[in-house]
Image (cartoon, helix red, strand yellow):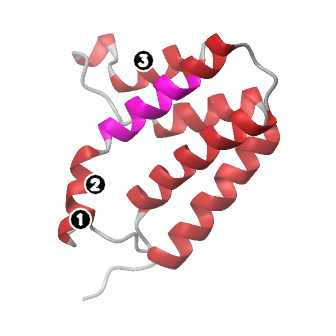
């Protein structure tokens, strides 16, 4: 079900199959599979975001961490793990433009607070 939630987020029928990157749907699926894996992925997200201020980098590392945690904590069938891996790969592929900007050093940093004048 988590894989299809990510697919629906990335390719919504109502918006001409142009959607988001699937991160929130993926992390939600991780929480449903194992709350410990979800907490670890969220902790990585917040830590990387606080240190780097790159939301895309934090999201990508949280997806990888969530996937690894599911594999380590979960007692799931191979099909569930395959679907989890496919969903993670899809989220990473959907972030390809962000990955290119991170590599070039042109990715926008996350800002909190008022805009500077």
Q: Which residues are magenta?
A: 84-94
Q: Residue at x 74, y 42 (%)?
A: 37
Which SS class for mark 3?
Answer: helix
The foreground one among 55 and 91 is 91
Pick whichever of labels 3 and 1 is earlier in the sequence. Answer: 3
Pick whichever of labels 3 and 2 is earlier in the sequence. Answer: 3
Q: Are marks 3 and 2 in contact (CB under 8 Å)?
A: no
Q: Which mark is residue 48?
A: none
Q: Main secondary structure of the magenta part?
A: helix
Would residue 92 appear left or right of 77 to someone viewing this image? left
Q: Residue at x 73, y 13 (%)?
A: 77
Seen in the picture, residue 93 relative to 98 is either above or below; the reply is above
Q: Position of residue 65 (x, y in %)?
A: 61, 49
Would residue 78 appear left or right of 94 to someone viewing this image? right
Q: Residue at x 23, y 65 (%)?
A: 103
Q: Which mark is residue 8?
A: 3
Q: Are marks 2 and 1 in contact (CB under 8 Å)?
A: yes
Would residue 49 appear left or right of 44 to someone viewing this image? left
Which SS class for mark 1?
Answer: helix
Seen in the picture, residue 46 relative to 60 is either above or below; the reply is below
Q: Residue at x 79, y 29 (%)?
A: 74
Circle 2 is placed at which residue position? 99
Q: Is residue 87 magenta?
A: yes
Would residue 35 appear left or right of 90 to someone viewing this image? right
The quarter in which the N terminus is drawn is top right
Q: CA distance from mark 3 to mark 1?
A: 29 Å
Q: Which mark is residue 103?
A: 1
């Amino acid at each position: 079900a988590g894989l299809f939630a990510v697919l629906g987020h990335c390719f919504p029928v109502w918006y001409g199959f142009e959607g988001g990157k699937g991160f929130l749907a993926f992390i939600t699926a991780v929480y449903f599979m194992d709350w410990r894996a979800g907490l670890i992925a969220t902790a990585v997200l917040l830590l990387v975001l606080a240190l780097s201020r790159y939301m895309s980098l934090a999201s990508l590392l949280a997806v990888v961490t969530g996937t690894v945690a599911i594999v380590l904590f979960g007692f799931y069938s191979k099909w569930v793990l395959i679907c989890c891996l496919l969903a993670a790969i899809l989220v990473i592929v959907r972030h390809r433009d962000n990955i290119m900007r991170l590599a070039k050093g042109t990715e926008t940093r996350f800002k909190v607070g008022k805009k500077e004048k």
